[in-house]
Amino acid sequence: MFALAALAPVARAQAPAPAAAEDPTQQQLDKLSAQIQDIQDAQAAQGKRLDDLEKKITDLTDKLGQPGSTGSVSADDVKKLAEQVQEIDKKRQADNEAIVKELEKLDRALGVAPSKGKASTPVATSGGNDTPAGGPQKGYYYTIAKGDNLSLIAKAYRTQGVNVTAEQIRAANPGINPNGLIVGKKIFIPDPNAK
């Protein structure tokens, strides 16, 4: 019986031997199967993320294409817009000059003092509340019209023989803002040649 008892552990050791040899191989296969499953799960999760990102990109593209959307603009877009604005401004200035020339032709044809909007009236000043800066002067009152600036007003008067500059007009009207003339306000146009 002792011999049987001694052989029993040997038999037990030999019997599991084939299972033990399979066990590391099986463990390796199980480990590889788990890793493959993890990779497949990660790939499926990445696919879902890609689908979500594609949907977001499509939604953003649609929003940018809608009227009234506020999308970002590039420096090139801003540059192109600035060039277009400059061209429009040049055309506006050319149109303004053409209008001024036509008005000057009309004034000369009618024999009237330069006008823009309302006709200017020659006035000989002598004291009073309307006396321009620097004491009594001879000159004209002019009512500012839309689109006027001191240079255009001076130029219009020069074409009528009144040799006046924008600076002289500004000096004769203290407190006037040359960059913000008020339409309808009367200003004094000095006539340096008047006696």
Image (cartoon, helix red, strand yellow):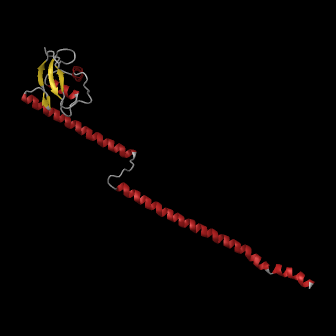
Number of numbered discs on residues: 0
Residue 100's quadrant in the figure? top left
Residue at 34 percent across and 44 percent down: it is 80
Check the picture and name the quadrant holding the C terminus.
top left
The image position of residue 35, as x and y in percent, is 63, 68
From the viewer's perspective, is 85 left or right of 193?
A: right
The image position of residue 5, as x and y in percent, is 89, 82
Pick the front one: 149 or 118:
118
The image position of residue 126, as x and y in percent, is 14, 15
Check the picture and name the quadrant holding the N terminus.
bottom right
Pick the front one: 98 or 46:
46
Residue 55's quadrant in the figure? bottom left
The image position of residue 106, as x and y in percent, is 10, 32
From the viewer's perspective, is 180 left or right of 102?
A: right
Pick the front one: 175 or 92:
175
Answer above or below: position of 50 versus 102.
below
Q: Residue furthest right?
A: 2
